[in-house]
Amino acid sequence: MTKRDLVLRISEETGLNQQQVLDVVQKTLDHISAALARGETIELRNFGVFEVRVRKARIGRNPNAPEHDVRIPPRAVVKFKPGKEMREEVIKLTPEANKARS
């Protein structure tokens, strides 16, 4: 699903015009990105939590030249932990979970 698909669905369900919906969706994403860039945690109830974590430095290997080690510096990354409701919906896609429920 793309941002455009999301805007179309919300527009159809709410009756708002697409430009209004696009503005709201874009502002929401902008504010989430800005908060994460400041190192804040974003908690959206029934959806999930976005947080910034720092990966530690490590040594990597170049597959084309395995004799040379490559130092990978520490860096900040965004982690997402799904909320309970989302996790329960997504797990229904797992074939093993479907077999266990049958």
Image (tube, helix red, strand yellow):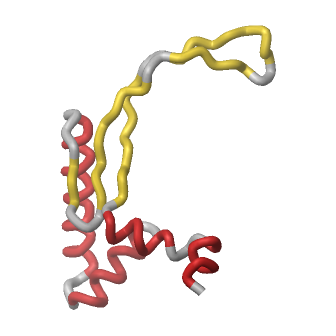
Q: Looking at the picture, tell me which residue is in the foreground, 93 or 33.
A: 93
Which of 28 and 102 lies nearest the eye of the viewer? 102
Q: Left or right of 73: which side holds 95?
A: right
Residue 1 position, x and y percent, is 47, 70
- The residue at 80%/21% (across/down) is 64
Indicate the quadrant where residue 63 lies.
Answer: top right
- Front-most of residues 9 and 99: 99
Q: Toward which corner of the image does residue 68 lie, by quadrant? A: top right
Q: Position of residue 51 (x, y in %)?
A: 29, 42
In the picture, measured across the screen, residue 62 lies left or right of residue 11, that is: right
What residue is at 36 percent from the left and 52 percent from the top? 81
Q: Looking at the picture, does residue 77 appear above or below residue 22?
A: above
User: Can you tell which quarter of the image residue 65 is in?
Assistant: top right
Residue beneath the point at 29% across and 64% down: 47
Q: Could you tell whether 28 is left or right of 80 in the image?
A: left
> In the image, residue 17 lies at what x, y percent?
23, 83
The C terminus: image quadrant: bottom right
Does residue 50 sit above or below 89 in this rendering? above
Front residue (pair 34, 80): 80
Residue 27 location, x and y as percent? Answer: 20, 58
Left/right of residue 62 with respect to residue 3 in the rendered view: right
Looking at the image, the residue that sits furthest to the top is 68
Location of residue 76 with respect to 65 vertically, above or below: below
Q: What number of labels is visible?
A: 0
